Amino acid sequence: MLHIDFDNTYARDLEGMYVPVEGAPAPKPEMVLLNEDLARELGLDPAALREPAGLAMLTGTAMPEGAAPLAMAYAGHQFGGFSPQLGDGRALLVGEVIDRNGRRRDIHLKGSGRTPFSRGGDGKAALGPVLREYILGEAMHHLGIPTTRALAAVATGETVYRETPLPGAVLSRVAASHLRVGTFQFFAARGDTVRLRRLADYAIARHDPDLAGTEDRYARFLDRVIARTMALVAQWMSVGFVHGVMNTDNTAISGETIDYGPCAFVDAYDPMAVFSSIDTHGRYAYARQPVLAQWNLARLAETLLPLMAPENPESALPVAQAAIERAPGLYADAWRARFAAKLGIADPIPEDDGRIDGFLELLGAAKADFTLSFRALGAAARGSDTALWAQLKGAPGLDAWLADWRARIAAGPGGAEAVAERIEAVNPVYIARNHRVEAALAAAQNGDLAPAHRLLAALSAPYTPRAESADLETPAPEDFGPYVTFCGT
Ligand code: AMP
Ligand code: MG
């Protein structure tokens, strides 16, 4: 029996900020992937999710008691241009549950059919992008990076039409919330300060409850969102992740990574790496992510001005501006902490920035594999440089860099083995490599889920090398070519 204790605060408290919706029928629902551990963490019975009532919920066809399915309104800057109305056009919020750790989590479906926000779209999703979001999101989670998670991927039995006919599917994902910068923009753009205030107070109660009721809560909330977003982007950078569509509607207030579309992990290091077919100007290239995050946060700050100073919103500008101007410093600190740890430096100081940049420059010059090069520092700390030299292809400057780095880690705490272990604890062996993801999706479309399961198993413990997954460590063969991914629509 599917029984879920929903507690739907969004539906209850934020009337007028969503539209109640129903999912489209799914002619022949079939479970493709179910995240049983996550289901249990949410207090859901995995077996019940596999039964017809579970599949009906996970496709949006029929909801269990207590669900309050709705499509959320939001706006957003997409590639710099403002769309006053986006909203859940192919998604719905099923409801909220309190998980085993006492945390409130949204259960949300993507690909569940048309809503009043669909505009010209069909409201559907194809199996490939659904599995992509599943795999990439789980990879991020197990890397220890805040993210929405995948609960299930269910095939609908329906054909969806993109460039070609494709099998349809619905992703159910779990998030700390689905509040986005774009949610605030929706009401700010309409001058609806009453709803905007309700939304902001709701967000504060949900994500920063210690600020609830305080006089300067909107300014402090802005500070919090800025801090967690910049910390998140530093984490992305530390694993070579390129989000691909950092529009304000894809920027969560919670500090979680959200909306995996044309995202990817870099293999050969290139600061201007872009994988998205639609990002022709490289707006969301790897190295631009911190700046674009700050830009998105400035859009959030603008929406909060009328709440910070209701009589005269402009008078709040200096406070908002100062908050935004702190973002680069917050990012720099988070970046240094992450990358210094990757180099085995336990006590980072600003002077380490040059060491980190120096290593990244060597990687860029040699077009070395980002993941394997950092990982090879573990062996280098133990005294064996062979793997590192192989990655860096004998880059000039490596000798000098190594000498400086060895002196630096020798001056820090712990012996060589402790340093190596620290390095290997934060530099993954397994990332979701593009060619492996593509192969897993292609096989799944032909009904073979073995490669997806195998990849997910490796990604579930990314810091631990295992003989049976050795082939998943290496970059794509030359003939895989430059990688381009498409929006997950
Ligand atoms: P995304 O690119 O996934 O961040 O989506 C941007 C906007 O387009 C959101 O409002 C989506 O709901 C909407 N959208 C994307 N794909 C579809 C689709 N197949 N049908 C309807 N709306 C869609
Ligand atoms: Mg989106």
Image (cartoon, rainbow, N blue to C red):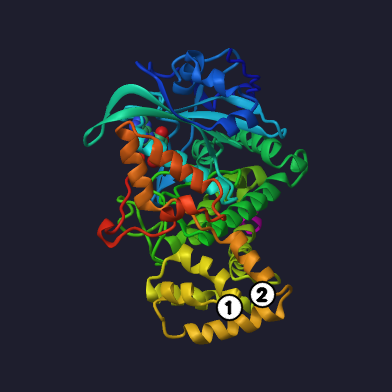
Residue that carries the numbered disc 2 in the rendered image: 416
Q: What element carries label 2?
A: helix
| The C terminus lies in quadrant | top left
Q: What is the secondary structure assignment of the residue under circle 1?
A: loop
- Asked which quadrant contains residue 280, the reply is bottom left
Query: Is residue 21 visible to us here?
Result: no
Q: Nearer the viewer, residue 402 or 140?
A: 402
Does 325 sit left or right of 63 as displayed? right
Using the rendered image of the protein, determine whether residue 356 is visible from the camera's viewpoint: yes
Pick whichever, 129 or 478, lies toward us: 478
Dot 2 alpha-carbon crowd within 10 angstroms: few under 14, some 14 to 19, many 20 or more = some
Q: Residue at x 62, y 76 (%)?
A: 352
Q: Are the two marked residues, 2 and 1, in contact with CB atoms closer than 8 angstroms?
A: yes
Q: Which of marks 2 and 1 is nearer the N terminus?
A: 1
Does 142 lie within the magenta span? no
Query: What residue does disc 1 label?
Result: 383
Q: Of 313 and 79, which appears nearest the observer?
A: 79
Q: Position of residue 33 (x, y in %)?
A: 46, 31
Residue found at the very far left of the displayed protein: 164
Please state which amino acid type lies under the numbered disc 1: Gly
Is residue 317 highlighted in magenta?
Answer: yes
Q: Which portion, as a residue range, is magenta?
A: 316-320
Amino acid type for the residue under numbered disc 2: Ala
